[in-house]
Each structure stands twice: as C-alpha cells, then as structure tokens.
Image (cartoon, grey):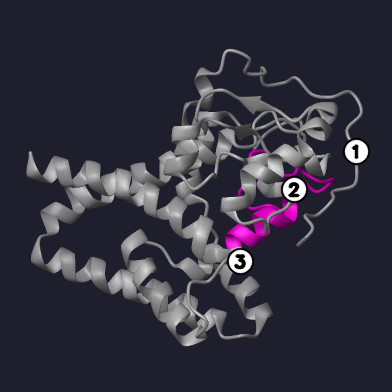
Amino acid sequence: MGHVDFGIHLFADGQCEHQWSRAQFYYNPFFRSMTLNRIFGVTQSIGCCFSQTMYDAVHMQHHKGNSDRQDENGDTVDWLSIYRHGHDGEAENPWRYVFLSFFRDDVGAIRKELRKRNNGDLFWGNLELAAFATTLLVMFVFNWRFVIFYFLPFWYLGHCFSYLNGYYRHYGANPDKPIAWGVSSYGKIYNWLFFYNGYHAEHHFRPKVHWTKMEKFHQSIEELQKQEGVRTIKRAHMLGFLDPDLPKRGERESSPVQEHVTSSAR
C-alpha cells in the first residue's frame, strides 16, 4: 500500500506543483537574482519531473497560437493545440489527446526555440533535463522495480491528467476571437487550489495579469465576454467532459476567421 500511496501522492502533487509553478514562476520570477531563479528552476525541474525552461518554451508557444486551428499546411502555431492532430478542422478526440500528447513532445523543436532566445535558456534547459534524468537514474539503481512499476506509470498518468485539464480549457472556445480563446470555470474551491487557473479565457486574453488580480479583471470585462460568447463551464476543467452543455465535436461557426491572431504580451 505504501507504494500505491506514494504513486497517488506523486500523481496529485505533480499536478498541484505543475499548476503552482506555471501560475507563479513563469510569469513572476520569485527572485530578483537571475542566478537564484535559474537554481530554483533546476530544483523545480527535478520536483516536477520535466525541464521548467523547456516547458516555458512550450507554454509561450501555446500563447502565440492560443490553441489555433490548422493552417493550409495542416500545422498549428501552438504545439499543444487541441486542433493540431484533429481532422477536417475539428478538435482531436479528447481521449486521444489526453493519452497520446505525452509522446508528442518534440525536444528538437523546443531546443531550436530556446536557441533563438540567445540568453542561456538552451544551456539551462539541457541542465534541468540532465538533472531530472540523473535523479531518475539514481532512483533506478536503488530500486528499479519501484521506478518501472510505480514511478513511471504515475508520472505518465499525471501528465495525462494535465492534458485533460488543457483540453477542456480550450474545447468549445473560439480560436478566432482573442477574448474567447479559452474556456473559464469560476468555482471558488477549484480556483483557490489552482491559483485562479480556472480563469483561462481571461488568462489568454491578458496573460500577464497576476493571478491575485484575475477575479477583479474578470469583473471588468464580464459584459464584453457575454457579448462575445466566451464559454464557461460549471465544473473544474478536469471534469469538463461531464459538462451538460458540452458542444458536440463537429459543431463549428459558419464563418471562421482565416487569419491567426497571436496573443498580445500586454
């Protein structure tokens, strides 16, 4: 039972820490010293089991595309777009997205993006990845059965849970309207636990608004959101598939905008 309890803890804690680090560290670094932020990023990479700097590149790409539809070449700007592996301009089946996205990360494309920054991110991204890989190797040497039969399965399922969250943060949203790029969920307990990550339409509309100001920001644009048809759900995003008003796949607006608009850094 101890191993199972640890696995559940790894699954749940990994999700909370992932949400916490993204809501906090990516947008508002904890330290004034860049060196301290870099060191903290290494420790977070070991704790969250993925490179924070590399994920920052993925996350910034997400905000450039905002879960955009495929272009004329069948590609999307957003590597995490729910439309990236869909067909006929529709979102991918949710369970394919949830269980296959883990295997779709393109480390080469991520490194290429980090190299463009020319600010040391490529070095630190590789260092963070190496730090996690070394930790995993040491764990494997001490107890390979634990790594193979407990750690890796729960690590994978934790990522699947994250992709489940991500899918329903955009399913039913309008990729052609900046104010409606995301789907929001306003449950208080959910937002208290996940640092107001439920305010996802607001987050995509103004990515740099601090999470402590998200509720007030929502109130300031609430009427505009209603006018523009911003989708909201009553349940937390990870339970979005239970939403009674879930749109059926295949339902699209009749005249989608052809040009892809990228997120403002305001």
**Overall secondary structure of the magenta section:** loop
Q: Is residue 52 above or below residue 155?
A: below
Tag 3 and tag 1, C-beta contact below 8 Å:
no
Residue labelled with disc 3: 109
Q: Is residue 28 visible in this depiction of the protein?
A: yes
Q: Quadrant of the N terminus?
A: top left
Residue 177 at x, y percent in the picture: 83, 39
Q: Secondary structure at mark 3?
A: helix
Determine crowd level at label 3: few under 14, some 14-19, many 20+ residues with C-alpha closer than 10 A.
few
Disc 3/disc 1 C-alpha distance (Å): 27 Å
Residue labelled with disc 2: 205
Q: Which one is closest to the eye, mark 2 or mark 3? A: 2
Q: Which span is picked out in magenta?
A: 58-85
Determine crowd level at label 2: few under 14, some 14-19, many 20+ residues with C-alpha closer than 10 A.
many
**Which mark is first along the chain, 3 or 2?**
3
Q: Secondary structure at mark 1?
A: loop
Is 200 displayed left or right of 223 in the figure? left
